Each structure stands twice: as structure tokens, then as C-alpha cells.
Amino acid sequence: MIGLSVLFLFLAQATDAVRTPDVPEAPGVYFLKGESAWVRLQPAVTSDANAKGLQLFVDTGGYTDLGINVVCPGSRASIRMFVPKPVLYVRAVGSAKDAMLIRLTKKKDNRVIKTAFSNVTMANKGGFRREDVFKLIHQEYPDGFFSVSPEKELPPGEYLLVLGNAVPAYDFGVDRKK
């Protein structure tokens, strides 16, 4: 009888340890602010994309590098976070294995994503610069959603969560605690 009690206690504690967050049902990317305030990230808006070296790339039949700069308007994302390792919950958008976190280059009035054809790999299908990519840890949940968080603390800045294809991508900013 004592053995069954210990087994029951162990199973009850194991269930509590893998508690599933109460993520909203609508498809999207979410951040839990505080204990119960879900914030939904909106897809990033892009205003311009310009290719660098396109003519040479075409003239050489693809033997030169092709770079693309994608511009997000505004110097800051509208969603701000004060945690250096935010956990983002994703429901029905992309897959955990294809998720990437990219740091945007901040300019005066916009933020820029830099890509290059020479950077494309199986793990980096968007061709993002290696120094702009932050490794993610992911957790899949039985309810059909997953979470991602950076492996290491993020420095303050502007970020883009890319889920497989670059569209849609979700932008947010990380600030220092006041």
C-alpha cells in the first residue's frame, strides 16, 4: 500500500511539472505578460526590399552572391518585452523545427533584415547573417501548439521570429528592466 501511495505522489508531481499553459485557441504567436495576460504578436510589416548584386547574379548565372535587405518601418516594434529570455507560444503557425530568431539591424526610422544567397543552408533557409541568428529551445505540447525561447539571454534590441518561410514573421523588442 505504501508503494502505491509513493507511485501516486510521484505521478501527481510529474503531471504538475509538465503543466500545459492555457494558450489562446486562435492561431498566432503569443507572449505571456505577467501571470495571465496573453499578448498576441502581429505579423511584421515590411515596406521595402532591395536586392544587392542582382544584375551581376543574373549575368553570371548565379555564380555571384545575391543579397536582399528587407525593411520594417519604424525604429521600434510595437510589442515590447522586459525579459531577456522571452518564451513565445505558437499555435497553428509554422513548426518548432523551422523556427528562427533573427536580430534586426536598427536604423533611424526603420529596422532591416539582411539576407544573402550564400548564407542559405538547410537550417537557415532565409539566408540570414550568422551573427543575427539566435539559437532557440523549443517545447511541443499535446494540445498542438509549441513554445520557443532563446538558448541564451537576448541583448536589448529588435527581433523577428521567423517560422519556416519568412512570411509571416513576428517582430518584437527586448528592453532592459527599468
Image: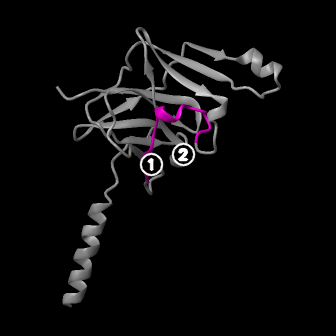
Residue at 23% of width from left, 88% of height from top?
Answer: 3
Residue at 80% of width from left, 20% of height from top?
Answer: 58
Write down the region rendered in magenta. Answer: 124-139
Q: Quadrant of the N terminus?
A: bottom left
Q: Secondary structure at mark 2?
A: loop
The reply, left or right, for residue 133 in relation to residue 178 is right
Evaluate if marks 1 and 2 touch, with contact meaning CB atoms under 8 Å apart. Answer: yes
Q: Secondary structure at mark 1?
A: strand
Q: Nearer the viewer, residue 77 or 136?
A: 136
Q: Quadrant of the C terminus?
A: top left
As shown in the figure, which amino acid type bears the numbered disc 2? Ser
Image vertical order of residue 3 relative to residue 129, above or below: below
Q: Does the stretch in magenta take in 172?
A: no
- List x then y, in percent, for residue 74: 42, 12
Q: Nearer the viewer, residue 128 or 96?
A: 128
Quarter where residue 121 is shown: top right
Q: Which residue is mark 2?
A: 95
What's the CA distance linking mark 1 and mark 2? 8 Å
**Picture disc at residue 146:** 1
Please tell me which of labels 1 and 2 falls first in the chain.
2
Image vertical order of residue 129 relative to residue 152, above or below: above
Image vertical order of residue 53 relative to residue 156, above or below: above
As shown in the figure, which amino acid type bears the numbered disc 1? Phe
